[in-house]
């Protein structure tokens, strides 16, 4: 059997709403970029079948789709089309198997993809992953808008490059790994919502919503958390309603009725500051409670008649409350 190359062209013009798939899973974000008028969608493959009664074309083997800034490849593609003003117009396409997409500086891959042609929206599922200059993304669904830097991810795990640390001698290669239920991003920032977990250096930070801001090199410089903030760094813990992480300095500032503790003290105030990997706290308007050693530990320390704590005067120490 002789293989042949099939090529199809569609002139993509504005399509009537009744001709476009109305699935909520493929709706365009509100920040959709206007599609160029008269752009073409080019599809090539080894085999093609036209099903005119269903207004579809079936492509198989080495399928490749080119549209504006997108280069999309997969094993099989079902393309849906409509006739408008005498011209055939692509409405959407469904890719299956070894999906690989390139759009400018961004790449994505997965097992399935749905391409909403008029809205220029690509939705990748099936263990999808994506890569851009500043981040690596994983999740259950990736949504990419052609020609823009925006992305949306469900059940996301994103590894971001961090801005260089200010402390000399610090390990500079310390990425910021963030997981959440959903993330929306642009070139300047990314917004994470739902069960947000941040892991950076020695810290585990959790909250309801987080906004990560980038510098011109697209490295994370700051992370702002809101809602049920909980931070763990070594044997120190802090909580509050808001927190800001300065990535270069490694400083976490917790506000909104903040509390913090370590094995020795418990702190309340209007602001608590801690440096990642450190041992101390700073606070404003603070109330500090020194923890009492457990009774069993106190009994073990007894060494003098009458139950006195063993000779603290010689060591220069002070008695625990």
Image (cartoon, grey):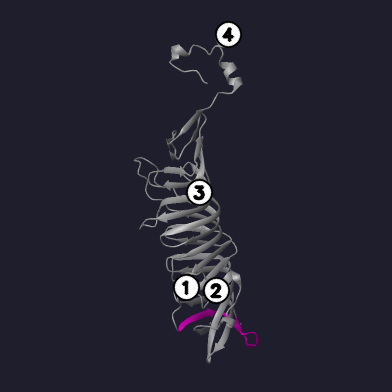
2 or 3: tag closer to the N-terminus: 2
Q: Which residues are magenta?
A: 38-57
Q: How far apart are the alpha carbons under marks 3 and 1? A: 32 Å
The residue at the far front in this view is: 285
User: Magenta-highlighted stretch: main secondary structure?
Assistant: strand
Q: How far apart are the alpha carbons under marks 2 and 3? A: 32 Å
Q: Which mark is residue 198?
A: 3
Residue shown at the point (54%, 53%) measured from the top left: 179
* Residue 286 vs residue 160, the one in the foreground: 286
Q: How far apart are the alpha carbons under marks 2 and 1? A: 10 Å
The local secondary structure at tag 4 comes to helix
Residue receiving disc 2:
115
3 or 1: tag closer to the N-terminus: 1
Frontmost of labels 3 and 4 is 4
The local secondary structure at tag 3 comes to strand
Frontmost of labels 3 and 1 is 3
Residue shown at the point (51%, 52%) measured from the top left: 178
Residue 250 lies within the magenta run: no
Residue receiving disc 4:
306
Frontmost of labels 2 and 3 is 3
């Amino acid at each position: 059997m002789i293989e042949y190359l099939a090529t199809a062209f569609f002139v993509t013009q504005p399509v009537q709403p009744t001709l476009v798939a109305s699935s909520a899973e493929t709706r365009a974000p509100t920040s959709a970029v206007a599609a160029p008028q008269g752009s073409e969608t080019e599809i090539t493959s080894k085999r093609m079948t036209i099903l005119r009664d269903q207004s579809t074309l079936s492509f198989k083997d080495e399928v490749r789709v080119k549209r504006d800034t997108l280069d999309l490849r997969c094993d099989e593609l079902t393309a849906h089309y409509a006739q408008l003003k005498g011209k055939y117009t692509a409405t959407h396409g469904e890719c299956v198997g070894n999906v690989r997409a390139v759009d400018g500086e961004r790449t994505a891959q997965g097992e399935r993809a749905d391409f909403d042609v008029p809205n220029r929206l690509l939705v990748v599922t099936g263990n999808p992953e994506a890569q851009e200059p500043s981040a690596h993304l994983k999740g259950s669904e990736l949504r990419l808008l052609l020609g823009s830097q925006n992305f949306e991810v469900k059940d996301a795990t994103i590894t971001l490059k961090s801005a260089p640390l200010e402390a000399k001698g610090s390990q500079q290669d310390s990425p910021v790994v963030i997981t959440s239920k959903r993330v929306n991003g642009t070139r300047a920032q990314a917004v994470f919502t739902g069960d947000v977990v941040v892991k950076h250096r020695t810290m585990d930070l959790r909250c309801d919503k987080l906004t990560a801001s980038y510098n011109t090199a697209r490295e994370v410089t700051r992370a702002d958390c809101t809602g049920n903030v909980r931070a763990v760094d070594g044997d120190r813990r802090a909580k509050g309603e808001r927190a800001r992480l300065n990535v270069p300095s490694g400083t976490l500032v917790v506000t909104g009725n903040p509390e913090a503790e370590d094995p020795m003290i418990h702190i309340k105030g209007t602001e608590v500051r801690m440096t990642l990997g450190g041992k101390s706290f700073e606070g404003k308007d603070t109330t500090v409670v020194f923890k009492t050693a457990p009774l069993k530990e106190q009994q073990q320390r007894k060494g003098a008649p009458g139950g006195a704590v063993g000779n603290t005067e010689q060591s220069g120490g002070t008695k625990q409350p």
